[in-house]
Image (cartoon, rainbow, N blue to C red):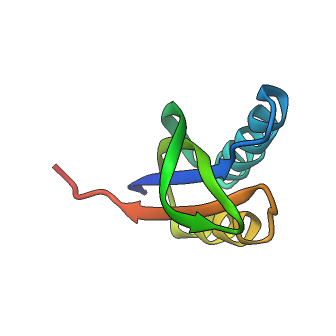
Amino acid sequence: MRSYEMMMILNSQLDEEAIEAILEKATSIIISKNGEITKVEKWGKRRLAYEVKGTTEGFYVVIEFVADNEATVEVERVLKITEEVLRFLLVRKDEE
């Protein structure tokens, strides 16, 4: 299993309940594929560098986890079709 870090930018108009639902969806996919969540950081609302899907603000969340490739493929697939996710980036962390 490898270490990954994923940053998501969610629609800033979402309420706390909707944000939690999206985070639960992403983390449950990782856990269901035998992954392990190591850290979830909510950075809050930030101004975007450029307009994305008609909005200039986004809610930033960083999730660190350990998983196999199967989990990353599935979580990427789901986030691509989730309308509330403006952008996301999943990267493999260097082994230390």
Which of the 4 quarters of the picture holds residue 55?
bottom right
Left or right of 85 in this view: 52: left
Instruction: Report the residue at 79% width, 39% height from top.
Output: 14
Is residue 38 in view from this perspective? yes
Instruction: Report the residue at 62% width, 67% height from top.
Output: 52
In-front residue for pair 34/8: 8
In-front residue for pair 76/43: 43
Residue 54: percent from the left, percent from the top? 71, 66
Instruction: Report the residue at 72% width, 52% height from top.
Output: 29
Is residue 34 in view from this perspective? no
* Vertical placement of residue 49 versus 70, above or below: above
* Vertical placement of residue 95 versus 89, above or below: above
- Seen as rendered, the residue at the extreme top is 16
- Seen as rendered, the residue at the extreme left is 96
Residue 93: percent from the left, percent from the top? 30, 57
* Vertical placement of residue 69 versus 46, above or below: below
Residue 25: percent from the left, percent from the top? 78, 46
